[in-house]
Amino acid sequence: MSEPMTNALRLAEAAIFAAPQPLTTRQLGQLLPGDVEPEAVLAALGALYAPRGVNLVEVGGGWQFRTAPDIAPYLRKVVEVPRRLPRVAMETLAIIAYHQPVTRPEIEEIRGAALSQVTLDLLLENGLVTPKGRRETPGRPTLWGTTPAFLAQFGLNDLRELPKREELLIDPTGPVRATPPAPEAETRAEEGLFTAGDEAEAP
């Protein structure tokens, strides 16, 4: 391997490791010398890490190091796994993911129950949802959608990778009431998003 490529691999490795969010190919390209293609560097780095305990994966529109799937079960013996979001928060998050942009009244109609501000605040605090403007109807209610952090948290590169509605529902024409896929965060020691208590919410 040439010296320029070796140096580019080291730089890419350090940048992806240090980035708080998945590092995009464009961001990496801005760090590398002009004669080095970021795609080639990412491919080489991915191959280098493929047999290791940490793999380079594409999530949330960027690149991030994550625990190898076959190693994850062993880590649960020594790493304290953050608790999941409460059921009602996961259900709300799934509705937002599949129906976005969606208003709070629409979420409540789909759930068939009121949505507490505590649940919405929990999703906001964890960076999983964000306002997406306002619907041009009386009262101009806020529209809600998911964030890049949601994609990264659930190991998705974009929303098209969400399970199909027909895979989640007996009646594909009905509302989504399933939760998103199990988050990969539970296999990562550094993730601390799902730390809320399991509070109940009355329908």
Image: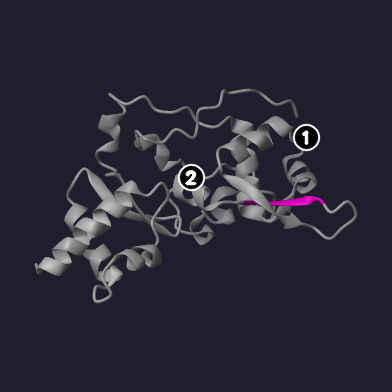
Q: Is residue 111 magenta?
A: no
Q: Nearer the viewer, residue 201 or 193?
A: 193
Q: Residue at x 66, y 35 (%)?
A: 121
Give how far across and how far down residue 163 sits, in percent. 51, 54
Q: Quadrant of residue 35?
A: bottom left
Give how far across and how far down residue 54 sits, in percent. 24, 45
> What is the total number of numbered labels drawn onto the structure image?
2
Quadrant, the N terminus: bottom left
Q: Quadrant of residue 46?
A: bottom left
Identify residue for label 1. 114
Q: Which residues are magenta?
A: 141-145
Quadrant, the C terminus: top right
Given the image, on which type of amino acid does mark 2 rest? Pro
Q: Residue at x 31, y 54 (%)?
A: 15
Q: Name, please, the residue furthest toward the right.
A: 138
Q: Quadrant of residue 28?
A: bottom left
Q: Residue at x 59, y 37 (%)?
A: 125
In the picture, measured across the screen, residue 63 lies left or right of residue 172, that is left
Find the distance from the CA under tag 1 to the CA under tag 2. 24 Å
Secondary structure of the residue carrying numbered label 2? loop
Color theme of the render: one colour
Q: Nearer the viewer, residue 103 or 171?
A: 103
Given the image, on which type of amino acid does mark 1 rest? Ala
Whether residue 170 is visible to the viewer of this picture, yes or no, is no
Q: Main secondary structure of the magenta part?
A: strand
User: 148 above or below 183?
Assistant: below
Q: Residue at x 33, y 54 (%)?
A: 57
Report crowding for label 1: few under 14, some 14 to 19, many 20 or more residues within 10 A (C-alpha): some
Whether residue 17 is visible to the viewer of this picture, yes or no, is yes
Q: Earlier in the sequence, mark 1 or mark 2?
A: 1
Give how far across and how far down residue 36 sits, in percent. 24, 73
- Mark on residue 181? 2
